[in-house]
Image (spheres, rainbow, N blue to C red):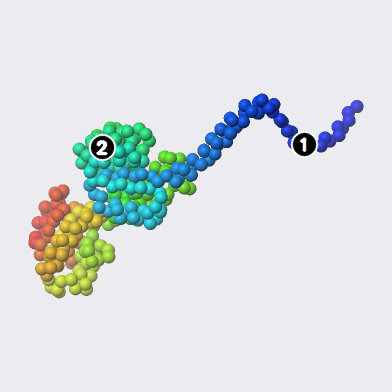
Amino acid sequence: MCGVLPAMPSCALRVTPHPAVASRLRPWLALLCCLIGALCLLPLAVAATPVRVLVVTSNAHLLPAAEAAFRATHGEGVATFTFRTDAPDAVALSHADVIYARFAPPPLLRAMAPGVRQAAARGALVFGAPAESVDAAWGAGAAQRAAADAAQPYWEAGGVDNLAAFLALAVAARQRMQGLPAQDVIAVPAVRPAPAAGIYHPRAAQPFASLADYLKWYRQAGIVADGAPLVGIAFYATHYRQRDLAHIDALIAALEHQGVGAVPVFGWPLSGLDALVTQDGASPLRVLLALNLTIPRAEDKDWLARHPA
């Protein structure tokens, strides 16, 4: 016959190791607890360590303002920045977590090469532009092409906001390399597009998209007398985007000081700037100072022939 066994009261099973075994295990258990604690604290330590960014470029004048904008958004403890126009020494390269070079002269890139290769070998983020120049100086594989491609639009658009976003891009890339949790990686703003062409004036808040709009504002501003002769200044958009405008501002001030109106036009090629130098099919400019003909196109010659000064 089969019977039903009576229910047994439940109880926790307690195992007491032999005292000799316990004494041997105790140091190992303590070490294991320490290792687990250290692993738990590792992300916090990584987050608390500022990312050290080194940027080498001949066009560094906006980077201090970009750094200030970065700190206003992300705070003081996230990253440290060093901006150089000359070759950094071996110590600076050995301390950097991120190394970026942009349009640095080939001799400067070659001088950096030993330190850059060592930095790449220890896991630093190394990238630069143009990629061909960087690879030729540092060796193929030292620089990360994907990071350079991601950075390029920010520099092309230019301006303090875009360069601050580039700094965020560099810091965020390094944070991901360090294994920081996704929620702790800083946000990277999208590129803010910049106009490819327009009419600039240092007293205007924004560039103008047509000569008619510019002249309306210019006359209302009363900078020069009504009927004053107008002189155009054509220059590359790169100067506008990078705010490398000291020479343009000096030309404008010199012309206006003499009672001559200035029409500073940025863009390229010159033959594509009709809407910025003509009004109702004709140009009111007496003279055009073309600073953007160092890279000429065949169409520019025909355009100049159609718009005699």
Is the residue 138 above or below the residue 72 in the image? above
For the N terminus, the quadrant is top right
Please name whichever residue, 68 or 296, is drawn nearer the observer in this view of the structure.
68
- Residue on which disc 1 sits: 11
Residue 192 relative to residue 307: left or right: right
Could you tell me if residue 166 is visible in this image? yes
Please name whichever residue, 218 or 59, is drawn nearer the observer in this view of the structure.
59
The dot on residue 112 is: 2
Q: Residue at x 48, y 48 (%)?
A: 183
Sooner in the amino-acid sequence: mark 1 or mark 2: 1
Circle count: 2
Q: Residue at x 36, y 53 (%)?
A: 70
Label 1 environment density (alpha carbons within 10 Å; few <14, some 14–19, many ≥20): few
Mark 1–mark 2 contact, CB under 8 Å?
Answer: no
Looking at the rendered structure, the secondary structure element under dot 1 is loop
The single residue placed furthest to the right in the displayed view is 1
Looking at the rendered structure, the secondary structure element under dot 2 is helix
x, y percent for residue 244: 22, 55
x, y percent for residue 307: 11, 60
